[in-house]
Image (cartoon, helix red, strand yellow):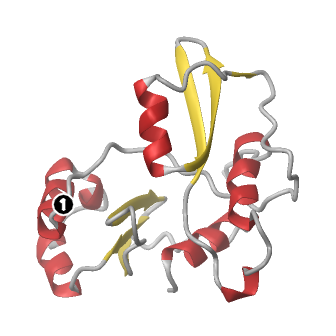
Amino acid sequence: MNGLAETLERVGRGQPLPTDGCVSLLPGPGDPAVAAVLGFTAHHLIAADIDSDWLTSRLGNAGIGRPLQPDFLAALGEHLQARPGGQDVLLATVGTGSSTGPELPGLTRDTGSSDHPRVQRASRYRDDVLVAAVHGGLLTIGRVGRPLGDQHRGRTGVSRRRYRAATGHARPRPRAG
C-alpha cells in the first residue's frame, strides 16, 4: 500500500480497501498533522510514523473497532507526543474539474461566520474553508491533504477539486443485498 494521499485517491476512484478486518500502517501524513486514523468498512488505516511492533502490541487481538477507541487514540497521541483531535468525516471522490468551487445544492454559503470557533478550528487544519449555514449550525468544508505526487505537479487544484467534488457531486452507492 502506498501513502495516505495515494490510498485516498484510489478509494475516491471507487477502488475500496479490502474488507478483511485488518489495519494498515502507512507513513505519517506530515505537517501540520502528526497522524491520521481512518475507519473504512472492515479495514482501518493508521498513518503515523510509528513502529509496526508498537502498533501490534497496542492492537493485540482486539476487535475491528480498536483503532478508533478513545484509549487507543490517547496512547497513540502520547506515543507521538501529540494531542488527539476530534473525529471527523472525510469524503473522497474524483473531481469534476470545476474551478468555481463546490456546488452546495440546498445550502446557503455563510460569509459572516469567520469568528465562529468551528470555522477558526477548520481554518487551522484545512485550506480553502467554505462555510454554509445549515439548520441548527454551520457546515465547514475544506481541502485537506498533500500534493498527490509528481504526476500531478503543475496541475493546480487537483486535490482541491477532489474534495470539493465530494461535497456536491458524491452520490451514495446502492448497497448490495
* Callout 1: SS: helix
- Residue drawn at x 24%, y 61% as measured from the top left: 63
In the foreground, 158 or 174: 158
Q: Is residue 72 left or right of residue 116?
A: left
- Residue drawn at x 76%, y 45% as measured from the top left: 171
- Figure check: 92 above or below 166: below
- Figure check: 38 above or below 88: below
- Figure check: 170 above or below 49: above
Is residue 174 visible to us here?
no
Q: Is residue 174 left or right of residue 124?
A: right
Give, as a three-letter code, the residue at label 1. Answer: Gly
- Figure check: 109 above or below 43: above
Q: Please state the horizontal and vertical placement of residue 53, each as a whole percent of the image.
A: 16, 86
- Residue drawn at x 77%, y 68% as measured from the top left: 156
Q: Please state the horizontal and vertical placement of residue 61, each as a whole percent of the image.
A: 17, 71
- Residue drawn at x 40%, y 67% as measured from the top left: 31
Q: Badge 1: few (under 14), some or many (20 or more) residues near its Cα, within 10 Å? A: some
Q: Please state the horizontal and vertical placement of residue 150, each as a whole percent of the image.
A: 68, 88
Is residue 83 visible to us here?
yes
Q: Quadrant of residue 110?
A: top right
Q: Quadrant of residue 11?
A: bottom right
Q: Is residue 11 left or right of residue 32?
A: right
Q: Quadrant of residue 133?
A: top right
In the foreground, 24 or 147: 147
Residue at which label 1 appears: 77
Q: How many callouts does the rendering have?
A: 1
In the foreground, 9 or 83: 83
Q: Please state the horizontal and vertical placement of residue 77, each as a whole percent of the image.
A: 18, 60
